[in-house]
Image (cartoon, rainbow, N blue to C red):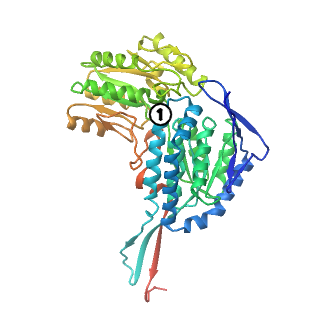
Amino acid sequence: MTEIQEHQLFIGGEWLPAENGQTFEKVNPYTGQVIASVAAATPADAARAADAAQAAFPAWAALAPGARRDLFLRAAELLEKDQERVISTIVADLGSPVGWAAFNHHFCVGLLRELAGQTGALVGQIIPSDAPGQTSYAVRQPAGVVLGMAPWNAPLILGLRAIAAPLAYGNTVIFKGSEDSPGVHALIVKLLQEAGFPAGVVNYLSHTRQDAPAVVETLIAHPAVRRINFTGSTPVGRSIAEMAARHLKPAVLELGGKAPFIVLPDADIGAAVAAACFGAFMNQGQICMTTQRLIIHQEVREAFEQGLAKRVAGLTIGDPTNPQTQIGCLIDQRAVQRLHDLMEDAVNKGARVLVGGGMTGPAFQPTVLTGVTPEMRIYHEEAFGPLVPVIEVATVDEAVRVANDTEYGLSSAVFSGDEALAWAVAARLETGMVHINGATVNDEPQVPFGGVKSSGYGRFGGTYGLNEFTELRWISVQRGPHPYPL
């Protein structure tokens, strides 16, 4: 029997139960076993967390950049040493393979080190003035309390990303975790606590799915909260954007995607197949950048499909704790049912299952549909699972039109042997990120990460988060007399 963990709230430097003592159970999606009892925050708990973050802000904002840098480097060191626990916690929370968990761990060690170098990024600028004796300065300062909300699918990466840059720039944070990955999200907070981040600088809330709207609205409305960032679904992101707008609070939103993957006639088909398989099925397709539309030129569609079907059929499906497993299970049965419904709709309307289409134990098999047309739901809807359609096109212009025929605009890919042509296509794609001859699933700590259209707005990564999580102020100094007219 798996030992049942207990995860509490973290407010003002203390691990606490919810105000009313309420908890919920977290189940391992692969085994079905209960693995944790999790505190379920109330709006009152949310208000307490915001108050604690506000109280801690002045001292944290005033802390020397070098002192903050040392804390980030210490956290990176602790995370690097804690690889085994981190990986096992991710695998248990998600039912995802060890490989995906290991990537989360590796990426976040680098993320912490990247942001250690960002602690001194709040540089200013002297602006020439037309007023005699006046000097103007553009000054960046921490914004205040930042609310970071992260999903479960890349729990370590997205959880840490939600709060790390705001912390590096001198903000205090409230981290609202996901009910589907409470073990990982609590582990992030424990890591930062162990590294020495002061009390109140990082606060953590978990909650039930039904309590989420009330908790989030309390946090956004709280006067101390000055910035909001959210990664998750587009419908929830719209609600958060509306709440933030009512309170005139800036938000960074990284939402859903329907990433197109274009293969032109002169592409390296082997390379395209490898990138498509990785992009469509890594973490069972549960990534915002997942390849969700294979837009293949008719001259190479047959060769591409043959290569992809062979590669996908060879993927290892099974127990996610086995290091050899490449495909684990989906986060819950609702996700499984959604994929079955999308596949059934497509097949009933004329699509054909090229590979996959069934279940291996609790895992949905990686599945490729061919002959997909706009009348099918899978053409438009985000699957967020290991189900990808092939859409045949006759020209480059048609490929671009199909790629842009979606409300989403996060990631995309173009495969061509002609780099100039690929650049021309990339310039026409309505996405925040385009990868030429590379997979749609691609990220590094120092790059500008984000989307357009219904995939959200704002950017994470590198120095680009500086614009999102700081205030830019104009401060002028008058030296000597000023000839005022009155």
Q: Identify the residue position indicated by label 1 in the image.
A: 100
Q: Residue at x 21, y 36 (%)?
A: 419
Using the rendered view, name the quadrant where residue 309 is placed: top left
Taking depth in this image into account, of 205 and 458 the one nearest to the observer is: 205
Taking depth in this image into account, of 379 and 172 the one nearest to the observer is: 172
- Is residue 259 visible to the viewer in this orientation of the structure? yes
- Residue neighbourhood size for the residue with mark 1, other residues' Cα within 10 Å, grouped as few (<14), some (14–19), many (≥20): many
- State whether residue 132 is above or below residue 152: below
Q: What x and y, as percent, mark residue 230? A: 54, 44
Taking depth in this image into account, of 84 and 155 the one nearest to the observer is: 84
Q: What x and y, as percent, mark residue 162? A: 53, 48
Q: Residue at x 42, y 68 (%)?
A: 124
Query: Mark 1 is on which residue type?
Result: Trp
Q: What x and y, as percent, mark residue 232? A: 54, 38
Tell me: 377 left or right of 39. left
- Is residue 372 visible to the viewer in this orientation of the structure? no
Tell me: 104 left or right of 198. left
